[in-house]
Amino acid sequence: MNQSTTAFDIGLEKGEANYKGLSPLSFLKRSAHVYPNKVAVIHGERRYSYAEFYARSRRLASALALHGVGMGDTVAVMAPNVPEMLECHFAVPMLGAVLNAINTRLDAATVGFILGHGEAKVVLVDKQLSPVMAEALSSSENAPFVIDIDDVMAPSGDLIGDVEYEAFIAAGDPEFAWESPADEWTTIALNYTSGTTGDPKGVLYSHRGAYLNAIGNAMTMGVDARSRYLWTLPMFHCNGWTFTWGVTAVGGTHVCLRDVDPAKIFPLIAEHKVTHMCGAPVVLTALIHAPDDVRRQFDHGISIATGGAAPPSAVIAGMEELGFSVTHLYGMTECYGPSTVCVWQPEWENLPLEERSVLMARQGVNYMTLEDQAIIDPDTMQSVPSDGETMGELMLKGNTVMKGYLKNPEATEAALRGDWLHTGDLGVMHSNGYIEIKDRSKDIIISGGENISSLEVEEALYRHPEIMEAAVVAAPHEKWGETPCAFVALTPGADTLSDADVIAYCRENLAHFKCPTKVIFGALPKTSTGKIQKFILREKVGN
Amino acid sequence: MNQSTTAFDIGLEKGEANYKGLSPLSFLKRSAHVYPNKVAVIHGERRYSYAEFYARSRRLASALALHGVGMGDTVAVMAPNVPEMLECHFAVPMLGAVLNAINTRLDAATVGFILGHGEAKVVLVDKQLSPVMAEALSSSENAPFVIDIDDVMAPSGDLIGDVEYEAFIAAGDPEFAWESPADEWTTIALNYTSGTTGDPKGVLYSHRGAYLNAIGNAMTMGVDARSRYLWTLPMFHCNGWTFTWGVTAVGGTHVCLRDVDPAKIFPLIAEHKVTHMCGAPVVLTALIHAPDDVRRQFDHGISIATGGAAPPSAVIAGMEELGFSVTHLYGMTECYGPSTVCVWQPEWENLPLEERSVLMARQGVNYMTLEDQAIIDPDTMQSVPSDGETMGELMLKGNTVMKGYLKNPEATEAALRGDWLHTGDLGVMHSNGYIEIKDRSKDIIISGGENISSLEVEEALYRHPEIMEAAVVAAPHEKWGETPCAFVALTPGADTLSDADVIAYCRENLAHFKCPTKVIFGALPKTSTGKIQKFILREKVGN
């Protein structure tokens, strides 16, 4: 629509009174004002009120400013889900600086690459992670200022930095007069993808996008001032899918957690009456299959959001038995974490589990704060029909799509070409407007010219009561080109299954051409965020 | 903070993939996609699903476009809370045009002024209001195209227009390809203030501000997809405090209502299990004092937001007895309706009613979507101390402050001077960060050099069990300059009170210099939005 100047514009420009760049920094400021004495952050024996959370964040910002951190500088942090990590999410952007939260499971070489590529000026590191960081720093070209996080709950590790966190912020001003950036398009965070080929790419988020996705999360998951959010999702993962900011926005309580260990999770849920958490399906699986003396049921109502892969029906059922309601989200680093939600429809209430879980396995519809999503033919850039069958690529657009990749204009251009974010995920559009991912482009198995969705085969395998986890990849095949090979981890205490048993089971439940011809048993390799690493499995089968 | 170009900006400009102007139009599009078959709008026997609500809005937009309505044109509507009014809230902005919803209680001369000043190109009018509109049009300089809304639930009235609404939209395209404005600062609505002196001023809202305030409402009041919102608040009043857009954002159900009549409200709440509604305290009073055969109690939990005046303790208690929880909001036309909320604090739960209602009478804290508010000395533009005593003017800033007044740069400049919206309301900042309005500037009574808050005297009067409504204004006084005069409406069936009784009661409950010296009994004059018209009372006492 063309803009023209009308009486509705003349002398009515934006000003300080009626325009303010959106920034999640406003959330902490407000919650500290509204809920000064309320517990904002819990970590072991530590408790911080919202007034303290804000004061500590301002101290950190002030101390960083004294060390020369300012607009456009990078501050890297490598830590589990501890209070200092939350404080970084507010303190660093208060300076117009960029927060680079690093995946805690990365090797030293990759961390070194990230510190160099991101040009980190300051690094914060939890002492448990100091060995990797020390090695990374030794090989890094730049020599950042290093701050140790000396968490009493860290199991081990040396202090390797220039100063310890508490001493560092003690020098900062708890009333530090920060300003949010004048331009809401200013970068707030730098998150490196865990690319399986080539160097990691640095995804950039804006203050505007972070504000909106945080609100989208709160509204989608019903997080409010009464909520207690348990940090089972790493904060380094898309800034905790932006829940770092979203829980703060509504004045909820953050319950920190260093390790995704059911023996720690169940007691924390009980003690703090946790209402919300997030995690990959493998986190849910770990809870369901926890030892009997660890596993507990709850009746106070817990919402768990899962993403990264569709929750198999057995996982949905298992979680419901424990007292959790499961919401299926979809997203990726390039869209601030969740962009898409399988919105629950009231008429699903009375469906049998199997039917319900087929519907819940769909990724669903765009978040209220994402402008649009579509399944598009990448050659023609036209939407495919909403028939549940025609495959295309899932594409997204809106304010919660990344600014682009740092210092990588070719990759940015490729990812955002044609005015859409290309997710690389292949799927269909159902007649009810819900999208369903069928596979990553590279996960499709082409056998005798037929496309086989590895997800479909996996979903069948997950329904077998003795199979805990499954992953299916293409193995080379003389005659068919490719053939499905299944990797299977059995439930604890399961009877021994043979490969013939698994194949026979599949032939009862799938078209025969889709059935695995080979089955390999054992634990599955996973990323730090709980995604099964199919590229390792592919290597094992020579593909 | 200065902006500079860093690696985080180079080649990373906003584009179609990652930037979209905020607009509440996205809410209806998404809800029609996610909840196509869900009931969006209920009016008498009529039901519209979200798909139908969207299709009807697109038909209206398309038909208006065929009549030449486009960017920057004004479309006026004068109607009660009917489905057509909701449709206008989406259809008109789809064209980049500006919606001018007119107060239904205005006289023809004022309506004529508004049509002329706003340069309405099209007018929609409910047939009940056609007599006033016909008169307004006859005296208006411009000759807009007129569309009749022929609601079967309208009690009477002629059709005066060029075409009837259903016939008009039948010619429109239900798949009309609208675009939201490229610039989110584009004006979406024009709302005239009901100024008591001079001509009404035309307050302008942007798409951005409307989007944010609508989300702020949904989050503040906990409105979600399961909510059923009863339209006891006029939609012409700040676009229904932006709940027109907010309820649509979350896919809730709008329950329309032509008249604020307890005999209609109670049955609708019961039939549709209404969860949310809004209204001035007089609406709450009307419910509490409804005849016994009309009044009902509910146990399903209803949230009612009230604003325009602090809810007296008797009103809070009365509503709680009926099953409503009361939230006190504050706002004005210049800030999209609500900007401020008395956020409930958990520790209030166990307080006695009297203490609780003192806290709940405070206007509270800024909405999450408003940047800031403060009590400021307008001379120095410095905040007053947070002592609960020092008076200053409530000032607001942020994205939900108006763009300004239409064709009135002086008034815009005055309202937004010093980078804050000057509300004209006088109040204090409490130590807990909650503001409390003590009075409109002109409602302060100055007696013998002492300031008397008319609100404080009114609050005391409301606590009298036989007083239903009260308003206090300054009457001229020979000796003291001014003296408080109380206007009082008694509860139905109350014993007769004398003026001496009322004065004696006040002397027991207030400092003597604050007590009314004169009491006048009878119904109080009110605006269409339920505010007591103190200027009429002032005229009665010769002030």
Image (cartoon, coloured by chain):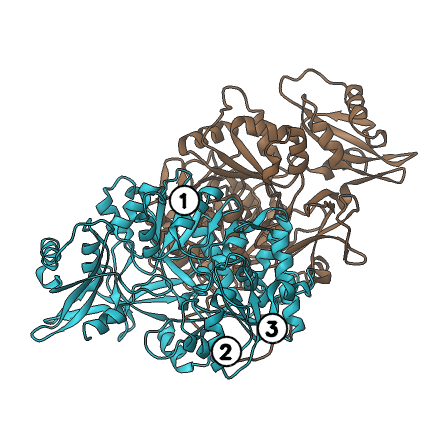
Chain colours: A cyan, B brown
Q: Which image quadrant for residue B327?
A: top right
The amino acid type, in three-letter code, at marker 3 is: Asp
Q: CA distance from mark 3 to mark 1?
A: 42 Å
* Residue to which mark 3 is pinned: A162
Label 2: few (<14), some (14–19) or many (≥20) C-alpha neighbours in 10 Å: many
Q: First in sequence: mark 3 or mark 1?
A: 3
Q: Which residue sits at x=13%, y=62%?
A: A514
Q: Which residue sits at x=69%, y=28%?
A: B462
Q: CA distance from mark 1 to mark 2?
A: 41 Å
Label for residue A502? none
Tag 1 subunit: A
State the quadrant of the N terminus of chain B.
bottom right
> Is there CB contact under 8 Å for labels 1 and 2?
no
* Residue to which mark 1 is pinned: A302
Q: First in sequence: mark 1 or mark 2?
A: 2
On whether disc 1 and disc 2 are found on a single subunit, the reply is yes
Q: Nearer the viewer, mark 1 or mark 2?
A: 2
Q: Residue furthest left?
A: A479
Residue B149 in view, yes or no: no
The amino acid type, in three-letter code, at marker 2 is: Leu
Q: Nearer the viewer, mark 3 or mark 1?
A: 3
Label 3: few (<14), some (14–19) or many (≥20) C-alpha neighbours in 10 Å: few
The x and y percentages for residue A218 are 47, 52
The x and y percentages for residue A262 are 38, 50
The one nearer the camera, B81 or B266, is B266
* Residue to which mark 2 is pinned: A137
Tag 3 subunit: A
Label 1: few (<14), some (14–19) or many (≥20) C-alpha neighbours in 10 Å: many
The x and y percentages for residue B366 are 62, 51
Residue A304 in view, yes or no: yes
